[in-house]
Amino acid sequence: MDARRTQFFRLSKARGVYKSIKPQKSGIIKSKVLPGFQFRIEDLFTKPSPDEMINDKVYQDFVLPGYLKEKRARLLAEERAKQLAEQLRALGIKPIL
């Protein structure tokens, strides 16, 4: 499949016909119905991972806010576990990890 030849359409309720949706010059399609929803046409073919998408301004605010929140919580928990393990070692206790 070729991202340059992919087209998107929306149904015009008033006329009952499909109208072409033109991407921006950057290849991004932005929804007029769902505020903030957008995607890069090329990504439909390259299928970036959630970690790649989280660092991409196109996706991070709309598609993955829950994923980002969970990732941050996990990283904080891992850091806290490391700190507690260091405190246990300082007390002469070998932590089980």
Image (tube, rainbow, N blue to C red):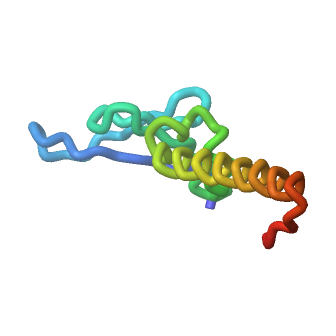
Tell me where residue 79 appears, x and y as whole percent: 73, 48
54 or 77: nearer the viewer: 77
Instruction: Decide if residue 38 is in sight here.
Output: yes
7 or 24: nearer the viewer: 24
Tell me where residue 61 appears, x and y as whole percent: 48, 35
Tell me where residue 80 appears, x and y as whole percent: 70, 49
7 or 97: nearer the viewer: 97
Q: Quadrant of residue 32?
A: top left
Q: Is residue 80 above or below residue 45?
A: above
Q: Is residue 73 left or right of residue 81?
A: left
Q: For the view shown, which residue lies furthest in the bottom direction?
A: 96
Q: Is residue 72 above or below residue 81?
A: above
**Residue visible at 58% across and 27% down in the picture:** 25
Q: Quadrant of residue 21?
A: top left
Q: Which quadrant of the rendered structure holds the C terminus?
A: bottom right
Tell me where residue 18 appears, x and y as whole percent: 26, 46
Q: For the view shown, which residue lies furthest in the left direction?
A: 14
**Residue visible at 85% across and 65% down in the picture:** 93
Q: For the view shown, which residue lies furthest in the top direction?
A: 25
Q: Which quadrant of the rendered structure holds the N terminus?
A: bottom right
Instruction: Decide if residue 2 is in sight here.
Output: no
**Residue visible at 61% across and 30% down in the picture:** 26
Q: Is residue 91 left or right of residue 29?
A: right
Q: For the view shown, which residue lies furthest in the front direction?
A: 91
Q: Is residue 19 left or right of residue 88?
A: left
